[in-house]
């Protein structure tokens, strides 16, 4: 309570929720910055577990149990989304994806 109420002057439920949401977003971004987007995209379940484990200490410090955290997808630009789709299928190598993109630009 000291960290939330004392440090943030968060007295209403909405203020506490905003503090926790900001904490969650900041820590998720910090943890995801250690990985490239292709790895995160192709291993959502594994990435969810890694991020959850990294965040548990922050929430435990606030007296909150983080019971589950799962990424359902990643939003990105349409061009990059198409590239990730081809990589995720496992049938296309990164080199092949770059070749396809190069051919599209030329053609």
Image (spheres, helix red, strand yellow):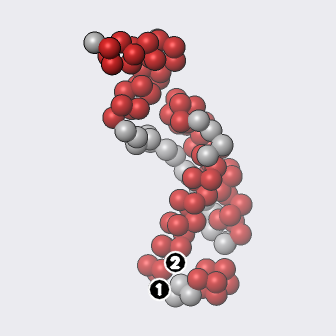
From the viewer's perspective, is residue 77 above or below residue 62? above
* Mark linked to residue 99: none
Residue 24 x, y percent position in the rendering: 56, 61
10 with respect to 60 (left or right): left
What residue is rendered at 52% in x and 77% in y? Answer: 16
Residue 31 x, y percent position in the rendering: 64, 49
Q: Quadrant of the N terminus?
A: bottom right
27 with respect to 93 (left or right): right
Residue 100: quadrant of the picture:
top left
Q: Nearer the viewer, residue 61 or 74?
A: 74
Task: Say whether residue 43 is visible.
Answer: no
What residue is rendered at 55% in x and 50% in y? Answer: 69
Instruction: Using a 10 Å C-alpha cutoff, classify the residue at mark 2 as few (fewer than 14 neighbours), some (14 to 19) or many (20 or more).
Output: some
Helix, strand or loop at label 2? It is helix
Please give the residue where the numbered disc 1 appears in the rendered image: 12
What residue is rendered at 57% in x and 43% in y? Answer: 48
Residue 79: quadrant of the picture:
top left
Count of number-bearing discs:
2
Q: Nearer the viewer, residue 32 or 70?
A: 32
Q: Nearer the viewer, residue 6 or 81?
A: 81
Q: Are marks 1 and 2 in contact (CB under 8 Å)?
A: yes
Please give the residue where the numbered disc 2 appears in the rendered image: 16
From the viewer's perspective, is residue 2 above or below residue 80? below
Residue 50 x, y percent position in the rendering: 65, 44
From the viewer's perspective, is residue 107 above or below residue 52? above
Q: Quadrant of the C terminus?
A: top left
Label 1 to label 2, Cα distance in Å? 6 Å
Residue 61 x, y percent position in the rendering: 71, 69
Task: Say whether residue 39 is visible.
Answer: yes
Helix, strand or loop at label 1? It is loop
What residue is rendered at 71% in x and 60% in y? Answer: 57
């Amino acid at each position: 309570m000291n960290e939330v109420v004392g440090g943030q002057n968060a007295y209403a439920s909405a203020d506490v929720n905003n503090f926790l949401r900001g904490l969650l977003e900041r820590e998720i971004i910090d943890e995801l910055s250690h990985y490239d987007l292709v790895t995160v995209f192709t291993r959502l379940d594994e990435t969810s577990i890694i991020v959850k484990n990294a965040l548990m200490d922050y929430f435990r410090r606030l007296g909150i149990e983080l019971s589950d955290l799962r990424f359902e997808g990643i939003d990105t630009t349409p061009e990059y989304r198409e590239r990730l789709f081809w990589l995720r299928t496992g049938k296309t190598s990164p080199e092949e994806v770059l070749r396809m993109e190069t051919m599209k630009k030329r053609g």
